[in-house]
Structure formats: C-alpha cells, structure tokens
C-alpha cells in the first residue's frame, strides 16, 4: 500500500527552527526514516513539504486518483487556519492521522483549535518526531 506524508509551512526549517520546541532533526532525517520503515514492511511512502496551501491541497486531490491508502499530515500553522485544506481532506475520503511535534495544548491558545482533529482517525502531539513513527505504525496496522 501507499502512504503519503504531508508537512505544512515552515517545517522545511526543522533542525534550525526553534530547536527547543521542534527538536534538532531535519525534515529529511524524518522522511528518510519513515520511508525506510515503510519499505521494510513492503509499503511505499511518498512525502511532500510545502509552504503553499494550494500545493498541499492539490497534492491531496492527486492522492485520491493515485490510490493513496493513508495520509499522515502535520498541517503546521494551517492546522489552525485552513478550512480549504480540511475540505480537501474530506473530499479525498482518505483516512489520516494528524501529527504535531510540539504539544499544541501547552502553547498559545490559538494553537488549541484544529480544523483537522474532528475528522482525523487520530491525533498525536507533543512527542517530537517520534509522533510520525507512531502514526506510521498505526497507519500500517489499519491498512492490513
Ligand atoms: C506544529 C504546531 C503548529 O501550531 C505550528 O504552527 C507548526 C508546527 C507542530 O508540529 O508542533 O508549524 O504543527
């Protein structure tokens, strides 16, 4: 099966961006690890990071025709703003897990609302990059 990992705005800065909040690993470190883990289990993992809302939306549209089975998404700041990306997820009908590196509930009040959580299979936050590994494990279990 095919898993798509989507990363929203500013996550390309991981490693140097507020490392006390987001950790020292780069996005490439995380994507490589996830791709290897999926491949070891005989699955195909695709990923995209974008700072542009429309690119993420169009990637979700494509995912539907491509037959992507599951999406892991960290919408980053779009979590708190994007009705459009939410609607794209709904339109795709592809099950997804929402991941955040930081514990959004322990931060500013505006981070405590998500346009995705109520339509996600599950939500993981506050566990750093391990959240992606746990999401992948859960996704693969659900696909089987
Ligand atoms: C984030 C949390 C968001 O509030 C923030 O805008 C991000 C990253 C996280 O992974 O902790 O860019 O999604």
Image (cartoon, helix red, strand yellow):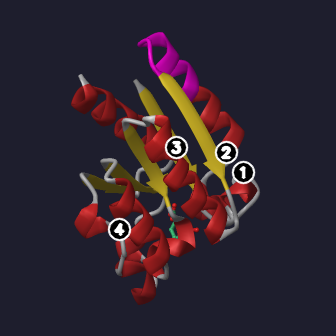
Task: Give the residue pinned by disc 2.
Answer: 27
Task: Give the residue pinned by disc 4.
Answer: 116
| Residue 63 screen position, x and y as percent | 49, 45
Task: Give the residue pinned by disc 3.
Answer: 5
Depicted 38 relative to depicted 48: above or below: above
- Visible in this render: residue 41? yes
Depicted 91 relative to depicted 67: above or below: below
> Which mark sits nearer the N-terminus, 1 or 2?
1
Q: Is residue 136 left or right of residue 11?
A: left
| Residue, far front | 65
Point out the frontmost of discs 4 and 1: 4
Taking depth in this image into account, of 114 and 19 the one nearest to the observer is: 114
Q: Residue at x 76, y 57 (%)?
A: 16
Residues at circles 1 and 2 in contact by the CB criterion of under 8 Å: yes
Point out the frontmost of discs 3 and 1: 3
Residues at circles 3 and 1 in contact by the CB criterion of under 8 Å: no
Which quarter of the rendering shows the C terminus?
Answer: top left
Task: Give the residue pinned by disc 1.
Answer: 15
Residue at mark 3: C-beta within 8 A of ligand 1: no
| Range shown magenta | 34-43
> Which mark sits nearer the N-terminus, 2 or 3?
3
Label 3 Cα crowd, 10 Å radius (few <14 / some 14-19 / many 20+): many
Point out the frontmost of discs 1 and 2: 2
Real-space Cα separation, disc 2 to disc 3, in angstroms = 11 Å
Point out the frontmost of discs 4 and 2: 4
| Residue 50 screen position, x and y as percent | 68, 59
Q: Residue at x 55, y 63 (%)?
A: 57
Label 1 Cα crowd, 10 Å radius (few <14 / some 14-19 / many 20+): some
> Which mark sits nearer the N-terminus, 4 or 3?
3
């Amino acid at each position: 099966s095919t898993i798509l990992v989507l990363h929203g705005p500013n996550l390309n800065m991981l490693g140097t961006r507020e490392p006390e909040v987001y950790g020292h690993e780069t996005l490439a470190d995380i994507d490589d690890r996830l791709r290897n883990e999926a491949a070891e289990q005989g699955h195909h993992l695709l990923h995209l990071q974008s700072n542009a809302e429309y690119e993420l939306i169009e990637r979700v549209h494509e995912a539907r025709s491509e037959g992507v089975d599951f999406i892991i998404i960290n919408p980053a700041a779009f979590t708190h703003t994007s009705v459009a990306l939410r609607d794209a997820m709904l339109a795709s009908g592809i099950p997804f897990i929402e991941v955040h590196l930081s514990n959004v509930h322990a931060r500013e009040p505006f981070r405590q609302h998500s346009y995705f959580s109520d339509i996600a299979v599950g939500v993981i936050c506050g566990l750093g990059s391990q959240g992606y590994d746990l999401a992948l494990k859960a996704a693969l279990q659900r696909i089987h």
